[in-house]
Image (cartoon, rainbow, N blue to C red):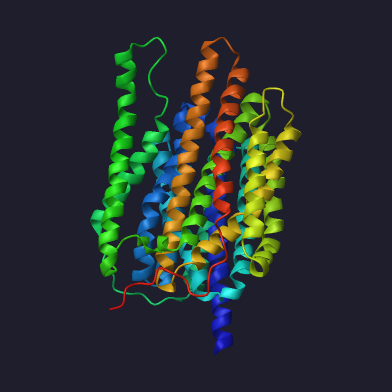
Amino acid sequence: MEQDHTARNFRVIWLMLAATFVVILNETIMGVALRELMLDLNVDARAAQWLTTAFLLTMAIVIPITGFLLQRFHTRPIFITAMSLFSAGTLLAALAPNFEVLLGARVVQASGTAIMIPLLMTTIMTLVPVAQRGRTMGNVSIVISVAPAIGPTVSGIILNALSWRWMFWIVLPIALVMLVIGIRRVENVTEPERVPLDVTSVILSAFGFGGLIYGLSRIGESGPEDATAAEQASAAMPMVIALVVGALGLGLFVWRQLRLQRRDRALLDLRTFRSSNFSASIAVMVVSMAALFGTIILLPIFMQQVLGLEPVQAGLLLLPGGLLMGLLAPFVGRLYDRFGPKPLVIPGSIIVSAALWGFAMVNESTSPYYLLGAHLLLSLGLATLFTPLFTSALGSVNPHLYAHASATVGTVQQVAGAAGTALFVTIMSTMSATLSSEGASGAVAAAGGIQTAFVGGALISMLAIVGALFVRKPADAPVGMPPAH
């Protein structure tokens, strides 16, 4: 009987890994395509980056609800719902007649992706013994690393011969196959509980996260340089209002969760943060994700607009770094099981910061091989960061809170990614516009804007080095225990 359960657990985990590969491939396939989309749909860089920001923002709003879903429903119907949403969004994106429909399709895709990632993490934490979690998370990283590696390359190859719509037409049949296999093979591995859904918390989280990300995306929109002070203040007002609404919404959301969790009714149970190790791991993850996503969206733009590379060339330059992460992942997992996170996350955070400072030195005459080397260095650092951070964070809480911990990790990860994307593109656009107004050529202005954004990312990354000092291997008795009834 034990052998039957082991085989079942192995099958469920690998089916979910395959599905996660598909949704992450979709998330990273857009980077190289942004320039083509901007030209085809007649939108600027600030609008085009919303195809990524809206995707991440939707995930940040939906992921908190997955804590409720994973407690309330069986594994199989949640998996089917997630892949059905993702497949429907992919079809809509392939058929999108304009930018607005494409943006809506990305939101539908993100709704499915938002469910899949916490479902995978919670399933692993439930089924895998503590002593093997590092190794298992390392195997997860192999799959998760290969998708980002292949995504830009596949996108570049497609765009070299076909339109951007084929990125979705190629992903769609893969998603449908995974859906059919899931319907036939995924089994229920968790026991649902009858927990209520707090609608007020859902609304507050939407206003909180949505307001903050929208406000961040509007930073720098103060009107043209020759505008009066009143006109600039008026142009900046939507940003101010959004940030205030976001801060208030997030504050009220946290306050409500603290009240509801006393009765085990919170949408996102924040008792996970009673673990200082969980908090430290989350902090490093937030800083790293903000820097990473901002860098990912700028690199293809720099390669194409400044260096004049073709999309396929830009994609191929990003391939070795992703493959390096995949190759290192199983070794990192084994090292975590043996030595814990400190020997990995401290050097990893330093390497990531060094790579971002390397990117901060780029200009219009930078060699593509320099970018390749810096990206390989960045990938090396990230390979030693993410597996230990995920494993340490999730392993630091009581099993009763696994679903909430997975949802929290996913939420802050996506919010940090969306904030990083919005801030980096805003800095780039603002500085590029300033340089253009001073008479700089297009390539010089774009290079200056991107270089300034990379400096911002490098400064942010230094905070991760400090946070890494406080990450440790989880104790045998995790904290965050629910109150006795």
Question: Is 441 in front, or is 273?
Answer: 273
Q: Quadrant of the C terminus?
A: bottom left
Residue 47: image location, x then y, percent: 44, 31
Residue 73: image location, x then y, percent: 36, 70
Q: Quadrant of the N terminus?
A: bottom right
In the current view of this chain or complex, which residue is farthest to the bottom? 1
For the image, the number of numbered tags is: 0
Task: Identify which residue is drawn at 52% across, 51% down.
Answer: 285
As drawn, 351 above or below 116: above
Task: Identify which residue is drawn at 42% across, 53% down.
Answer: 411
Find residue 224 and report its image quarter: top left
Task: Identify which residue is drawn at 33% across, 11% down.
Answer: 228
Residue 324: image location, x then y, percent: 71, 51
Question: Is 320 in front, or is 173?
Answer: 320
Residue 454: image location, x then y, percent: 59, 33
Question: Is 413 in front, or is 446?
Answer: 413
As drawn, 97 above or below 385: above
- Residue 346: tell me if it is visible: yes
Find residue 247 and report its image quarter: top left
Find residue 174 and report its image quarter: bottom right
- Residue 98: tell me if it is visible: no
Task: Identify which residue is drawn at 36% across, 75% down.
Answer: 192
